[in-house]
Image (cartoon, coloured by chain):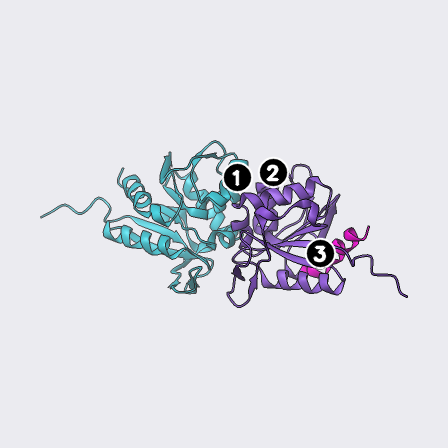
Chain colours: A purple, B cyan
Amino acid sequence: MPEPAPTADRRVALLIEEGFDDGEVTGVIVALHAAGVGVTLVGPWAGRQFHDKDHTVTVSSDVAAAKARAADFDAVVIPGGYAPDRMRMRHAMVDFARDMLAAGKPVAAICRGAQLLISANVLHGRTVTCWPSIAIDVKNAGGLYVDRPVTVDGNLITSRKADDVRAFTDALVAALTA
Amino acid sequence: MPEPAPTADRRVALLIEEGFDDGEVTGVIVALHAAGVGVTLVGPWAGRQFHDKDHTVTVSSDVAAAKARAADFDAVVIPGGYAPDRMRMRHAMVDFARDMLAAGKPVAAICRGAQLLISANVLHGRTVTCWPSIAIDVKNAGGLYVDRPVTVDGNLITSRKADDVRAFTDALVAALTA
């Protein structure tokens, strides 16, 4: 009998809000499912619909951020688009990401997802990449900005844009199986 | 014969990009026209169409930012929505706003318009209000954040959101006639 995949019992929280980047959300879900990883969509409320920034794709949240506990997840993904502009004002989402980082679990932010990490005040001295419009915000928050498809600093994994999803999810799956 | 209005020869540059907040752009144009002030839409290119963030309103740019000179305008308005996320990556727009501020002319930013001023690196020690999602970015950039409908610090005028347009344009018109 083959051994189960090392990711078979892994579960990732994917934060969701209005205006997400579809290439990032769908791309991450497809890649994680392909790796055998479960994905739970964590929104400001459970069972609500959210649209991508071009209003062409709709997804539903599974769990409310206020009910999500770091102990129940192996990693968190923060997608980009304009969703992080809303997520960063949701204290439960900011606190959840901070708790995951503090627990040493992988926190993976792509595109403008780093905005939430600025609001969580966790970037000081950490190497980070992001969408270029917010690079100065990352630097002003004490982050060490680099322009790379993916960068891994301890349990913090960051990427720039939807085109980087493969490198981003490869790094995340590697962290989940480390 | 009545004297001409004190604003009759005033001309304001309104920065424009994709994803602007319609309540802010339309609201500012209506209020400035009512005060007798001319408005020129300054985009990344001249003669292009731009849509608001809800894709319901279209406006055309009059002038390219690379051709806009501070000497030709009496003030600049930076509207919000998600347009500033794009504007802040346009060097000509960032430089134009910085030149206007350095020339002592009114620079008026509403909502996320302050993102462009962060990228211009001009907020250190200045009192600023903005949309709450970027308040921490303004503070990290050295700005002194306040939560008010409008705040005026020297020639820098800032407001939080479309609901503040009246206070915002009143302060701008006052600055234009000071």
Q: Is residue B75 one of those drawn in magenta?
A: no
Q: What chain does badge 1 belong to?
A: B
**Pointer 2 residue:** A121
Lower position in the chain sequence, tag 3 or tag 2 = 2
Question: Between A13 and A19, which is closer to the camera in this rendering?
Answer: A13
Residue range (magenta): A164-178
Residue visible at 59% across and 48% down in the picture: A67
Please indicate whether residue A100 sits to the left or right of residue B148 in the image: right
- Circles 2 and 1, Cβ within 8 Å, touching? The answer is yes
**Pointer 3 residue:** A168
Count of marks, rendered view: 3
Question: Between B138 and B101, which is closer to the camera in this rendering?
Answer: B138
Is residue B132 visible in the rendered image? The answer is: yes
Is residue A136 visible in the rendered image? The answer is: no
Q: Amino acid at mark 1?
A: Ile
**Pointer 1 residue:** B136
